Image (tube, coloured by chain):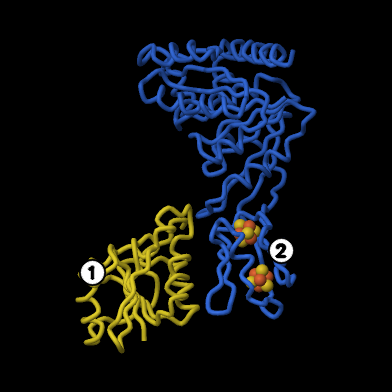
Amino acid sequence: MIISVASGKGGTGKTTVATSLALSLGKDTQLADCDVEAPNVHLFVHPEFRNEEIITVPVPKVDESRCTGCGKCVEICRFNAIVNIADTIMTFPELCHGCGGCQAVCPAGAIEEGERIIGVIQHGLCNGMDFLHGRLRIGEAMAPPLIRQVRSRINPDKTAVIDAPPGTSCPVIAAIKDTDFVVLVAEPTPFGLNDLELAIETVKILKIPAGLIINRSDIGDMGVADYAARENIPVLMEIPYDRNIAEAYCRGEPLVEAFPQWRRRFVRLCEDIDELVAEIAL
Amino acid sequence: MKVAVSSKGKTLDSELDERFGRAACFILVDLNTMSYEGVENTQNLNAIQGAGIQAAKTVVDHGAGVVITGNCGPKAFAVLSQAGIHTITGVSGKVKDVIEQYKKGELSPTDGPNVKGHWM
Ligand code: SF4
Ligand code: SF4
């Protein structure tokens, strides 16, 4: 089973929930930080990193001696990543999505597959739990291919928790698509509600069962809870606004390790999610 | 020789559009005859990415030898230099005045992009 943790906006407590959930699931768990533009889960679970893989995407390499200048590659590229200028073909690897279209249509076999580094994946262990995260190269814009690579390293026989990037754009979709359950984390404020609405729309389109955790539940208003009720999204947990929780966060301590009473609540949360997923499977 | 000016409209009275990739039009002026042609750049206004590259291709395909614009990013600049086109940036005003300035030798080519790419 893969549980993803997402939120319509950053700073809602997504990482707090993802780390505590993974730590409460027991040893046979994997924790994958897919917020590849700003991974921060490792700051809380302090993994011992074991190895690092360099991740590349394919980009076209044009052999000018074979190219006839027919322009078919340029026509097919939706991303303006390859262009014919004054009898030569220029490529813009940083715009290329690696779809292979240009190579497939080239009648002269002039396009070979080169590669471009987009980032790294680091693997580690924390107290017996598998940890992995992607780290996008600085200046790189293509987060989704790296996120898909992180996900492909998740062992399907174990339970995995994914910390998704914030927002509702392509990287989030890459991180939560085809997961078994999404835990959405939101704050009970008008801003929180606006972003939650977008997030819920996204998970509905992707047809992923979802539940809500309301963080800093005693600030703000009832808008978020009312909306969740209307949309049939169960509220799985409420985390109050508490200075002690904030202080533990600042020290880099996961909620469940700083406060034993929260460990019990997260263990129950795991059981609730299990039950919800089982019900849907019926 | 033809000079391409990024512009907000299709006539010599139009204002120069300081964006190169997402300019509304390009006006191509033949300096020998002073005849001109307005080319729309509309497909690029909505391009998801690579607008500068396609705009550069448009002016190359129309046979320009010099481009006069406001801001030009690194990819468009790379395409223009590949095609041997001189690019002049940081210019503003009415297209016809800009052309006059160019003819008097008051505008000199830029040796690199003057704005950063959107992905950098
Ligand atoms: S691989 Fe796809 S995105 Fe990349 S240049 Fe070729 S057609 Fe364009
Ligand atoms: S499709 Fe192949 S032969 Fe045609 S322009 Fe592109 S690289 Fe050259």
Split into quadrants, the picture shows ligand 1 in the one at bottom right
Which chain is tinted blue? A
Could you classify mark 2 by the number of other residues whose Cα lies within 10 Å: few (under 14), some (14-19), or many (20 or more)?
few
The quadrant holding residue A233 is: top right
Q: Nearer the viewer, residue B35 or A281?
A: B35
Classify mark 2 as within 8 Å of ligand 1 or not, answering yes or no: no
Residue under the image location 25 percent in, 79 percent down: B99
| Above-or-below relation of A230 to A73 | above
Mark 2 lies on residue: A113
Q: Position of residue A73 (x, y in %)?
A: 63, 65
Q: Position of residue A177 (x, y in %)?
A: 63, 33
SS of the residue under disc 1: loop
SS of the residue under disc 2: strand
Is residue A84 at least partly visible in the picture?
yes
Q: Nearer the viewer, residue A280 or A165?
A: A280
The tag on residue A115 is none
Q: Nearer the viewer, residue B40 or B116?
A: B40
Determine the colour of chain B: yellow
Q: Position of residue B19 (x, y in %)?
A: 33, 62
Is residue A62 at least partly visible in the picture?
no
Q: Hey, what amino acid is under mark 1?
A: Ser
* Number of marks: 2
Residue under the image location 52 percent in, 51 percent down: A141
Q: Hey, what amino acid is under mark 2?
A: Glu
Q: Position of residue B31 (x, y in %)?
A: 30, 86
Q: Quadrant of the C terminus of chain A?
A: top right
Mark 1 lies on residue: B92
